[in-house]
Amino acid sequence: MELSSLEVVIWSDYLCPWCYLNQERARRLEVVHGIKVRWMPYELHPDVPVGGRSIVSVYGKGDAKRAQTSLQRFVEMAKNEGLPFRPPSRVLPTRMAHLLATHVAAVEPERFADLHHRLFDAVWVSDLDITDLEVLTGLAGAVGADPVAAAEAVVAETHADDLARSREEAMENGVVGVPATMFPSGFVLPGFQDCATTDRIAERIIERSTS
């Protein structure tokens, strides 16, 4: 197997802070190890209602102090990763964001990576409402995608089957949460791991592919 053909699959959801932090691991796989990353959508909590849930209920189980402690941990971890982090005011459903990202990946794939990162930033840095169609089309336009076509795809749920297939594929490979990284061997690395662990696995994959 040629090094350039090596690919890992990462399932993620925009409402997941671990997935936001995991962007640096993906960057290392591509930049340091030369392994291509294919991002796949995964609605971690499709039951999040319209309007979302409060931060206190999600991260503090109703306890404001507990929520603050939990989120401060992510602030510190993000700082260590060199990423900005500002907790959102609410935890919002991500289906529309995934529909947008999947549409752009299908019709303008060269613009997907930028949009993908901007959607994460929209949640974990800018506290934007990713259930607002205007916000989503603004993000699409910012990366050079056609905002009109993007809006139509989101409203019509054009790529709903793609979301379902991605989730089914994840479950078939034993993925029950995100982030989850599947290496060419089929091995799935669950959760957010330290750089040393990710690097070690990547190096083994490269060594086997070139031996």
Image (cartoon, rainbow, N blue to C red):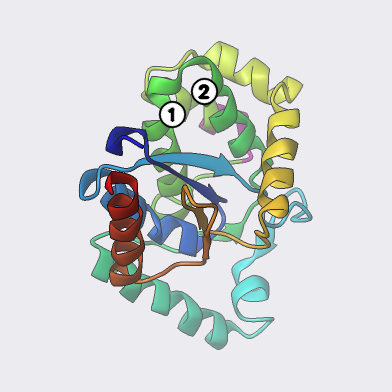
SS majority, magenta: helix
Q: Is residue 134 magenta?
A: yes
Q: Secondary structure at mark 2?
A: helix
Left or right position of 211 against 110: left
Which residue is drawn at the image coordinates 73% and 25% (left, top)? 157
CB atoms of marks 2 and 1 within 8 Å: yes
Question: Tag 1: residue type?
Answer: Phe
If the image is split into quadrants, where does the N terminus sit? top left
Q: Give me the disc on residue 88.
A: none
Q: Is residue 196 magenta?
A: no
- Report the front residue among 199 and 82: 199
Task: Indicate whether 141 appears above or below 45.
Answer: above
Question: Tag 2: residue type?
Answer: Val
| Residue density around tag 1, few if under 14, some if 14–19, many if 20 or more, within 10 Å | many
Which residue is drawn at the image coordinates 55% and 20% (left, top)? 106
Residue identifier under label 1 = 112
| Residue density around tag 2, few if under 14, some if 14–19, many if 20 or more, within 10 Å | many
Tell me which segment is drawn in magenta. 131-135
The picture places residue 72, in percent across and down from the top left corner, at 40, 78
The picture places residue 56, in percent across and down from the top left corner, at 62, 75
Residue identifier under label 2 = 104
The picture places residue 50, in percent across and down from the top left corner, at 75, 48
- Dividing the picture into quarters, in which one does residue 41 lie? top right
The picture places residue 112, in percent across and down from the top left corner, at 43, 29
Left or right position of 42 against 168: left
Q: Secondary structure at mark 1?
A: helix
The CA span between labels 2 and 1 is 6 Å
Numbered label tally = 2
- Report the front residue among 104 and 64: 104
2 or 1: tag closer to the N-terminus: 2
Residue that lies at the very extreme toward the front in this rendered image: 211
Which residue is drawn at the image coordinates 47% and 64% (left, top)? 18
